[in-house]
Image (tube, rainbow, N blue to C red):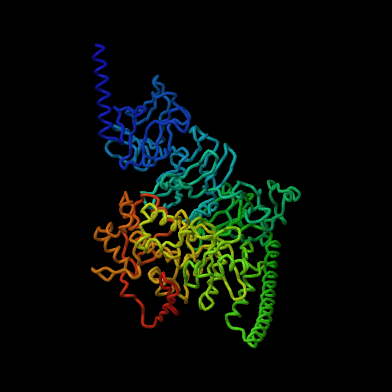
Amino acid sequence: MEAINVLHLLLISLFSAFLFAQATDIITPNQTLKDGDTIVSKDGSFELGFFSPGGSRNRYLGIWYKKVSLQTVVWVANRDSPLYDLSGALKVNGNGRLSLFSGMNSLIWSSFSLKKIDARDPIVQILDTGNLVVRNSGGDQDYIWQSLDYPGDTFLPGMKYGIDFLTGLNRFLTSWKSPDDPSTGNYTNKMDPNGVPQFFLKRNSVDVFRAGPWNGLRFTGMPNLKPNPIYRYEFVLTEDEAYYTYRLENPSVITRMQLIPSGALQRYTWVESHWNFYLSAQMDSCDRYMLCGSYGSCNINESPACSCLKGFVPNSPEAYSDGDWSKGCVRRVKLGCGEGEEDFLKISKLKLPDTRASWYDKSMDLNECKRACLRNCSCSAYSSFDIRDGGRGCIIWFGDLLDIREYDENGQDLFVRLATSEIEKYNIYDVKGKKRMMLIIVLSISLFLICLCICLIVCNMMKRKKLTTIDTLQRDLDRVSSRRQEEEDPELPFLDLEVISEATCGFSDGNKLGQGGFGPVYKGTLSTGEEIAVKRLSRTSRQGIEEFKNEIKLMAKLQHRNLVKILGYCVEEDERMLIYEYQRNKSLDSFIFDKERRIELDWPKRVEIIKGIARGLMYLHQDSRLRIIHRDLKASNVLLDSDMNPKISDFGLARTLGGDETEANTTRVVGTYGYMSPEYQIDGYFSLKSDVFSFGVLVLEIVSGRRNHGFCNHEHKLNLLGHAWRQYREDKASELTDEAFKESCTDISEVLRAIHIGLLCVQQDPIDRPNMSMVVLMLSSEMLLLDPKEPGFYNERNLLFSDTTSINLDVPSNNLQTMSVMEPR
């Protein structure tokens, strides 16, 4: 009898193992998921099983990324009830309830659902979204229970992060206690439905950070939440539910939002072999809840950061001056709530106050909102509910205004209730301010005209002394650049001409490294032993002075490992020179286009060069204090240090964009033929996507070892771009690769991916080209790529110039031509 029982148990175990082998993403009522067993979603993205976090020996049932090499758990069932051995077992009963048992058959954890759905042969399934669901086996999508309704510390794509008003379910994040302990930590991030719904980050029961109400575009306390190429987000507010969610623009990208044990709410994106920090909900100390007290406003750019709103004064002046702002501010003139005694002062660029004591209406306009606020003596302020399309809807605040901060951009208008006398006072200040500004303008113009007359007299005297035009421009440059107290970046060192001449052996031909677009470049060695590269502006250059000043101004402000570092400058006599750190391996074109040296660049080095250039461009476009378009990215302007790390150089033609600008127009088109984008070369229209086009050309040149300009093939008249596109469409892209690195290339798919990305960057329409942050992501991940469209200027022998466009080609260097197109269409 005992033998029969043993055989029976063995058959059940074998049958269970067979079922797991047949359907790896589900558990049926007659199955048990034991420690050591796992189920995996259909596309292999997520896995459910038992794990031990960090250095802990405790066992937990959880879900983690299957495709990520670093185990990253996104959900834990028994986070507050760990197992202490390997005896855990997960089952689902006929009523659709999940139960986790220990070896002693003790119930450790079970699922609970507020939904009232009849269970009919329920099964458990792990979905490709990371959602563990219990559903009826007939394929019913109305889930009996799902893990996304009971999240831990991670906000996954597709999850409804908020409240279901019908069931009372509130989905919120709770931090782990530590990286080794997933039990409930000290921090929660949860929606508060009172007034206008908003999310609060709390430490235990204390408010730490408030995201602010949704204004149609973003939460007013999260100005860094912007449209991006990785995910698309939305906020839904109806009578039945209020929630925030996001969905991936590209399913192959892996990203998550996590409330970490220290209390920060942060987004990460998986790049290569690590989680890359993307953004944080909290940005600085002004995000601390109620830092400045009631009616106080925080501005991180001011010192002290806290101040009272207009029309308000510190409740305790002594405490406020000592940096204790907790007591807040009060109205300078108390409200009387009489007709005509009060009005509203508009304050702009704010994070809207705490809306827990507020009322809203989605349909009212701002004038109706103002009248509604005036009718209620308890109303202290009002604003638009939704700022899109000029604004609509109404929010009205009652009582004190709490937790306000100011932004440089992406803030919102708030209309604060004040006594009419206070409003008139600020209006008078505005009038006086305008008069004062007019006076300043008049005086400035007068002073300018006086200075202009003096300059004309001086210039006339200089002409009489037979000074040349170059000398005149030189003196202008001396006044702007050589006096360090007037220089925009006084920390950039000025080097004497005598020092530079000695370092370069009197600018000898033996020290000459090459000839650039605006003059020769020399190698030098300072008395300290430091090697330098000296860019000497040609005296006869027609384009050099402005470019020289531009390069000083920009390079002094840029710091990145993939940008060449400027060490100083010299303006003396009739010489203008820039001093850079010396790059031992010179420029990229001296390798990839040289028959002998190209073999020194194997494929691993080439792909790292591509990635380095991409990171440098992303810094210029997105991460630097100035938004910069290089406008002359090419192989000869990429230098290589002793370790073959790429350094983008030559910023003479670069242009800065202000604020949120991404494009501009010029009547003076300058750049290098073969690298300029079609819209820039023809119409003088340049943007961040112009650099993306140049980068795409450079990628194809690095892969092929051939120049775009001057490329020829006996089968057609296409240039390198057209040839690469043709090979791609015919599935012959592998034939484009440089023979010099084929032996070092162990994975041809990586080369094909680089070609694919290059073709995406050189598409005809700038809108179709990816931005550089997306290019970096594509190069460092396995995300799916769109098919490229027709490239721009892919037929080199049939350029699209009109008869009225004058083209002026100069050949100042031996690396390529620099082109100026005057008066573009």
Q: Observer-nearest residue: 450 or 722? A: 722
Q: How many marks?
A: 0
Q: Is residue 716 above or below residue 152?
A: below
Direction top: furthest residue: 1
Residue drawn at point x = 30 percent, y = 66 percent: 722
The image shows residue 559 at horizontal and vertical percentages of 54, 57
The image shows residue 673 at horizontal and vertical percentages of 39, 72
Direction bottom: furthest residue: 464
Q: Is residue 454 above or below residue 87?
A: below
- Does residue 367 appear anywhere in the picture? no
**In which quadrant will I find the C terminus?**
bottom left
**In which quadrant will I find the N terminus?**
top left
Q: Is residue 608 above or below residue 693?
A: above
Direction right: furthest residue: 318
The image shows residue 720 at horizontal and vertical percentages of 32, 66
Q: Observer-nearest residue: 731 or 428? A: 731
- Does residue 310 appear anywhere in the picture? yes
Residue drawn at point x = 37 percent, y = 30 percent: 98
Q: Is residue 457 above or below residue 610?
A: below
The image shows residue 312 at horizontal and vertical percentages of 69, 55
